[in-house]
Image (cartoon, grey):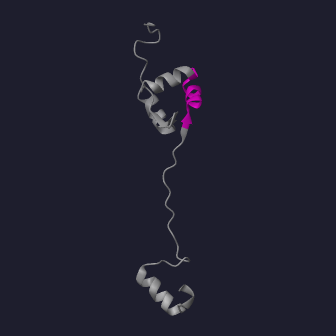
Amino acid sequence: MRGLLTETFESEYNTAMGVVPMSSPTIPCRAPQLRLLTMKEVALRLGISLQRTYEMGRLGLLPVVRLGRQLRVEEGRLTSWVESGGRGLPGGWKRNSD
């Protein structure tokens, strides 16, 4: 049916339907960029072992984001977490192996 419409009718139809012409300027809308760090990157930044990093993530001590089975940490939240003093493992660094 589009081939049967005259340019004038098509223009009026588009205006009535709220269709914006392709040549009109658009305002770019960008979402804030999130940088998700791997647990290996977190371990390197904190200077701790990878195993300890995963343990802290599983215990909820690190602000992790779960992507299925994978754990990630948003860079800004990690920085805030460190600046606020973080949280240590319960029982200190020499926990009893009960």
Q: Main secondary structure of the magenta part?
A: helix
Against 79, residue 15 (above or below) is below
> Residue 88: x and y, percent?
43, 19
Against 57, residue 27 (above or below) is below
Is residue 48 visible in the rendered image? The answer is no
The number of discs equals: 0
Of residue 68 and residue 1, the one placed in the foreground of this image is 1
Corner quadrant of residue 4: bottom right
Of residue 52 and residue 78, the one placed in the foreground of this image is 52
Is residue 43 visible in the rendered image? The answer is yes
Question: Quadrant where the C terminus lies?
Answer: top left
| Segment colored magenta | 37-50
> Residue 44: x and y, percent?
59, 26
**In the visual, does 16 lie left or right of 30?**
left
Against 96, residue 34 (above or below) is below
Residue at the (43%, 18%) spot, across then down: 89
**In the visual, does 48 lie left or right of 80?**
right
> Residue 81: x and y, percent?
44, 31
Residue at the (45%, 88%) spot, across then down: 12
Of residue 22 and residue 16, the one placed in the foreground of this image is 16
Query: Is residue 36 highlighted in magenta?
Result: no
Against 33, residue 50 (above or below) is above
Of residue 7 and residue 83, the one placed in the foreground of this image is 7
Q: Residue furthest front?
A: 1
> Residue 52: x and y, percent?
52, 20
Query: Is residue 48 highlighted in magenta?
Result: yes
